[in-house]
Image (tube, rainbow, N blue to C red):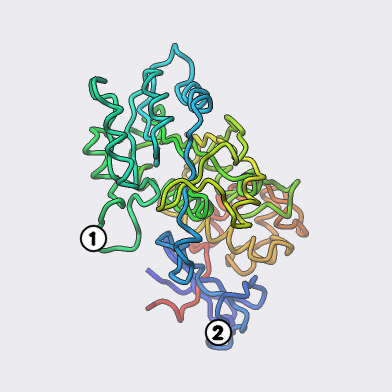
Amino acid sequence: MWIPVVGLPRRLRLSALAGAGRFCILGSEAATRKHLPARNHCGLSDSSPQLWPEPDFRNPPRKASKARLDYKRYVTDRRLAETLAQIYLGKPSRPPHLLLECNPGPGILTQALLEAGAKVVALESDKTFIPHLESLGKNLDGRLRVIHCDFFKLDPRSGGVIKPPAMSSRGLFKNLGIEAVPWTADIPLKVVGMFPSRGEKRALWKLAYDLYSCTSIYKFGRIEVNMFIGEKEFQKLMADPGNPDLYHVLSVIWQLACEIKVLHVEPWSSFDIYTRKGLLENPKRRELLDQLQQKLYLIQMTPRQNLFTKNLTPMNYNIFFHLLKHCFGRRSAAVIDHLRSLTPLDARDILMQIGKQEDEKVVNMHPQDFKTLFETIERSKDCAYKWLYDETLEDR
């Protein structure tokens, strides 16, 4: 429900958002992004930004050629596969978790996992690999199940009929006999694999929305994700105020959400590259040659039991995301300038409550500082409504 705030200056035409949900910000001091459309409603500033859209998790734009996008990395070195199997299974004294292996391809890692005693569900998006993968599970008493599915296309947000390799996590987990457990319970299963080489950021955003909303795989508990990620995206993910040029929204979101550990580092060149036509033995594209000089980091992302609180929940996380996007939209600005555009509350008082100065810069705020800031605003009793929106967008 959209309810106007009483007592705000008329020229700003502000209203407030009651509860969680979508909202827009406005005001003469609002931060801007060049790609956001400038509008002028009822005397509002032309630079007033509109609602930050959720990332588009569907397929890449059509203008990008398939030849440029369509290649995958696979573990094909036996020694590397055995090393990874030991890492994924952990200490022998612990009962092994069920492993969801994403796009195993030729199955070198799958075989190493099975030989080490693991129970594996292979989610393979390429049908050509499925017969061979199924052959690996013979005489293993059901320790291997092979399903035509792309993990990164689980629960697509594009709507319509879901067709393989896309799939519903609810249907997948029901088929596997996996039931939801409380967020405070132990890790129910592990997901292992590699982030798409040309879609790491997209995949991170989708998983972040799923995690904070407790939907998709995270509806079933604190699923542990173990993925290889490229060096550049890894550096951004782990950045903090000590690395202001790399520090961004996803850094804050993921460092708050998960305990992130580096389990292994491997040269990009250790992995074979496949296209639809088969193994790409001699990559000639400059972009591929550049990537082959980098490293891949195997990171373990374990959701924190204490992520959610009374003031940060799966119901209002989208407002928290909006606050972060707004702040990093003009990262060199002072936090107080952003707060004056986001909330009708006294920005100076809010900063004082969290122990920050008026001139505190966005890039000097640690992830926990942003969470504390958001929770302080959410639990404030100074005003019935905490966040601002543009009343002209109420019916959109």
Q: Is 334 positioned to the left or the right of 283 in the image?
A: right
Q: Position of residue 132 (x, y in %)?
A: 30, 35
- Asked if 332 appears above or below 90 in the picture, the reply is below
Spot the residue most to the front. 282
Q: Residue at x 51, y 41 (%)?
A: 272
Residue in front for this viewpoint, 44 or 378? 44
Q: Residue at x 41, y 29 (%)?
A: 187
Spot the residue most to the top. 93
Q: Residue at x 53, y 81 (%)?
A: 13
The image quadrant where one finds the N terminus is bottom left
- Asked if 289 appears above or below 307 in the picture, the reply is below
Q: SS class of the residue under badge 1?
A: loop
Look at mark 1 in the image and give the residue it sits on. Answer: 161
Whichever of callouts 1 and 2 sits on the residue coming sooner in the sequence is 2
Q: Position of residue 181 (x, y in %)?
A: 32, 33
Q: Amino acid at mark 2?
A: Arg
Q: Position of residue 242 (x, y in %)?
A: 75, 46
Q: Tell me which corner region of the image, top left, top right, bottom left or bottom right, holds residue 160.
A: bottom left
Q: Is 138 positioned to the left or the right of 374 in the image?
A: left
Look at mark 2 in the image and give the residue it sits on. Answer: 39
Q: Residues within 10 Å of mark 1 (few under 14, many from 20)?
A: few
The image quadrant where one finds the C terminus is bottom left
Q: Tell me which corner region of the image, top left, top right, bottom left or bottom right, holds residue 97.
A: top left
Q: Is 28 positioned to the left or the right of 391 in the image?
A: right
Q: SS class of the residue under badge 2?
A: loop
Residue in front for this viewpoint, 331 or 94? 94
Q: Position of residue 29 (x, y in %)?
A: 67, 74
Distance Cα–Cα, label 1 vs label 2: 36 Å
